[in-house]
Image (spheres, coloured by chain):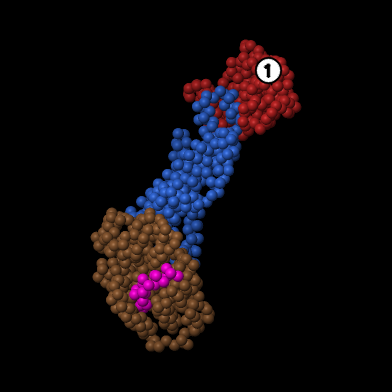
Chain colours: A brown, B blue, C red
Amino acid sequence: MNVDHLAGVASRRQWLVGAAAVAGLGAMGFTQAHASDAVRRPKLTLAGPFALVSYPLMRIVDSGALSDVADQVEFTTWKSPDQLRAMAIGQSADFIAVPSNVGANLYNRGVPLKLLDISTWALLWMVSRDKGLRTLADFRGREVVMPFRGDMPDILFQLLAEKQGIKVGTDIKLRYVASPIDAMQLLITRRADHALLAEPAVSMGLRKSQSFPVKVIAPDLYRSVDLQQEWGRVFQRAPRIPQAGVAALKSVHTDAKLLARFEQEHAKALLWCQAHPEECGQMAARHVSMLTPEGVADALAATRSTMTLVSAAQARPDLEFFYQQLLDRQPGLVGGKLPAGDYYG
Amino acid sequence: MTLLRRWLAGIPGYLWSGWGAVASLFLMVALWEELAAVYGPLVLPAPLDAAHTLLGWARRGGELWPTLEITGRRAFLGLGLAVGAGSLLGVVAGVSMTASMMARPWGTVLLGTPPIAWLVLAMLWFGTGDGTPVFTVFIACFPIVFVGGMQGARTLERHWRDLATVFELPWYMRVLDVYLPHVISYLFPAWIVALGSSWKVVVMAELLASDTGVGAQLATTRAQLDMAGTLAWIAAIVLVLLALEYLLLEPIKREIERWREGGGAAVEGGGR
Amino acid sequence: MGPPWKEAGDERATPASGEPALARLGPREVLQDVSLQLQAGNTLALVGPSGSGKSTLLHLCGGLLAVRDGEVENGFARTAMLFQQPSLLPWKTVIDNIALGLKARGVAKAGRMARARSMALAVGLDELALAQFPSQLSGGMQSRAALARALVLEPDLLLLDEPFSALDIGLREQMHRLLLAEQERRQLAVLMITTI
C-alpha cells in the first residue's frame, strides 16, 4: 500500500465514520442521541473472539463508556462455534462480535439478531519466506498451509485463485492444518514456506519469528500478498471485504435507543484503538492472555485504513456481494441463503 | 457350514421377532421429537429434519455413500488388524504361563488409556491421511481382543484335555474340535465389543485429525452450526452400527449362545 | 482274554511335574504301596472314604497321570473312561459327541453316525435328544450320552470315576444294568469307583 492511498483513505475513513454515525442514527429515527432516554439495564455483556473486531468492545468496557445505560458492562470471549452458538441462543450475551458470514448463518438458522455494523474490512494475508511475491499467481507451483479446512478463508482463497485461472490442487497445493498455531509452527520450523493467516495471527506470528529465541531457528518471514487487494483486483471493486462486525442479540435488538448509544460508543472506541495502538495492545493482552501487546499493535497498524465503522445498512451491498460469493461455493457458511432485510440493523 | 445354513434359515423368523426392537427404537425417536419441540431447532432439530437431510445426501448420490465408505474402510482395516493380531497374540500369551503374567498389566494399561491420547501421537506419525484413524482404531480394539484370546487359552479346562487323551484324539481333532471352539467362544464376544468400539473411535479420530470421512463432516457441520446435519451424520453412523449388529452379528451370537446356556428349559426326552 | 495287568511294589503317586495347570507343587503323598490286578470280563470296585486317592489311582490307570514309582501295565486292547462329569463338548450336538471316539479312530461319517445312533437308542436317548446340544439336556441324559460315547468304542476295559453319582437311584440302576448287559455281551472289564 502506498502513502497516497493511505492519506486518501484516512480522510475518506473519517468521512465514512461520521456519515455512518449520522446515517445510523437517522435510520433509527433519531437526530440526536439522548443518553438519558435509553432504559437503564443492570448488566450488559459484550462478547467477541480474539480478533481485531473485539478491541473496541474491550475499550468500551475499560473506559466505562456505557455506564450511563448499564450498571455493569463486561467483556467475555467466545473461542469455538459451540460457545458462540450457546451465547447466541441463551441469554449470556447482549452484543456479540462475529465474522460477517457467521452472523448471517445464525440469522438464517432462526437466532433473533440484528447486524449493527461492519468494523473490520481486511483480515487475510499470506505469510511467506519469499519476499517478492505480489499476487496469488506468484504462488503457482507452491504449497500453501491453510488452517480450518472449509472455513471462510479457505473458500475465499480458492475463489480468488480460480477467478485468476489458477487451479487449486494442481497449480497451488493446499495443506490443511488444524489451527493457525500449527500453521505458524510449520513456517517457523521450515517444514512449510507459505501460509494463509488472518490478523492478529499474522502480526503475532511475524513478531514471534523475529524475537529471541525463535529467531535463531526461524527463517525470515514476510507479510506477503494482501487478499483484500486481490479481491479488489479480481472483482473490480474496492479492496475491502466485510469481514466482521457487531450484532445485537435478542435481549437488546429491539431497543433502538440502546443500539444508537452503543454505535456512538463503538465508533469512539474504534477511533481510540487506531490512535493508540500500543495502549490498545496492552489492553487487549490484559483481556486475553494469548495476545501479545506488540502483536496487537502491529495488527492495528496494518489495518489502520481498513478498520472503519460502517453501519450494516450502508454495508449491505458489499455484504450481499460477499455472501453471494460464499453461497455459490459453500452455502453452509452463510446458512443456505441471503439473509432477509431485517437482518441489517 | 451348518452354522451358515442355520443362520440363513433363521433370518426370516429373526426379522419377524425384531418388531419389539423396532418398536423400542421408535419410542426413542418419539422422545427425541418431544425434546426438539421443547428446545427449538438450534439446540435440537426435529427427527424429521435430520432424516430429511440424511435422505437428501443419500439420494443425490452426494456425500453419504462415499463418506461412509471411507469411514467404513478405515474402521474395518483397524478392526481387522486388531482382531487378527489380538486373537493370535492373545491365544499365544494365554498358552504360556509366563507370557500371561507379563501380558496382563499391558492389557490393563492399553484398555485404560483413552484412545484420544493415542490420537495425538498418531497425528504426529501419520498426518491427516488414513493412517491416523486406522492406527487409533487398532490401538483401541487390540486390547479387547487380546484379553479375550488370552482368557480363552488360559481357561481350557482340565477335563477336556483328559477327554482328548482318553479318547486318543489326533492333533488336528484336538485343535479343531476342542481348542478352537473353546477359544472362539471367548473371542467372539470380544470381537463384537471391538466392532462397536471401532466405529466410535474412528469417528472421533476423523473428527479431530482428518479431512474426509464421517468425523470430518461432523466437524464441518459443527463449525457451520448446522445442527440438522450433525444429527444426520450421527444417525447415519448409529444406523450402520445397528444394521451390523442386529442383522449380521446377533444371529451368529444367538447360535453360539444356544450351546452355551442351553437355550430354554432342559428337555426330558423319551426313552425312560 | 488279555494278560492281567498289575502294578507292584512301592509306589508313590503324585501329580507329575510339568503339568502347569495344577497348583499343587511338591510331593504330596496320595498313594503308597498300592497294587491291583484286573482280569478280562471282571469287575473291580474301588471303595473308600473321600480323599483316599481313588480318583488318582483311576487316572493313573487311564494314563492321565505319570507314575512316580512303580509301573502300570495295561494289556487291554481298548480302554475307555467315564468321568465324574459327563464332559460332553458343549459346542457339538449329542450325536457328534457320541461319535467322537469313532471319529478319532478314523471311522467314516456314515458308519460312525449309524453306530452312534444305535448305541444312543440302546442307552435310551431319542432322535430329538441326539440333535440337541448337551446344555439342553438334563443331567441324567448327559450321563447316558457319556456312557454311549464310551461304549460305542467297544472297549475292553472301562474305567468309571463315579459317573452316576449325581443321578437318582432308579436311573443309576438302569445304567448299571446297561453295563452288565454290555459285559455279558463282550467280556468287558470294569474298574469303578463307588461310594456305596
Q: Position of residue A62 (x, y in %)?
A: 49, 77
| Rendering quarter of residue A226 | bottom left
Q: Is residue B78 positioned above or below B64 on the image?
A: above
Q: Is residue A335 positioned above or below B79 on the image?
A: below
According to the picture, the residue beneath numbered tag 1 turns out to be C70
For image coordinates 62% across by 18% down, the residue present is: C157
Q: Nearer the viewer, residue B104 or B235?
A: B104
Q: Secondary structure at mark 1?
A: loop
Q: Is residue A298 magenta?
A: yes
Q: Position of residue A144 (x, y in %)?
A: 33, 58
Q: Is residue A164 left or right of residue B150?
A: left
Q: Is residue A97 visible?
A: no
Amino acid type assigned to the residue bearing label 1 in the image:
Gly
The quadrant of the rendering that contains the N terminus of chain C is top right
Q: Which residues are magenta?
A: A293-312
Q: Nearer the viewer, residue C153 or A177?
A: A177
Q: Nearer the viewer, residue A1 or C112?
A: A1
For image coordinates 35% across by 70% down, the residue present is: A122
Residue farthest right in this picture: C49
For image coordinates 37% across by 63% down, the residue present is: A197
Q: Is residue A48 magenta?
A: no
Q: Position of residue A228 (x, y in %)?
A: 31, 68
Q: Is residue B185 left or right of residue C37?
A: left
Q: Mark 1: give few (<14), some (14-19) or many (20+) Cα within 10 Å.
A: some
Q: Is residue C13 visible?
A: yes
Q: Is residue A334 positioned above or below A24 on the image?
A: above
Chain ID at mark 1: C
The quadrant of the rendering that contains the C terminus of chain C is top right
Q: Nearer the viewer, residue B6 or A182?
A: A182
For image coordinates 52% across by 30% down, the residue present is: B175
| Rendering quarter of residue A179 | bottom left
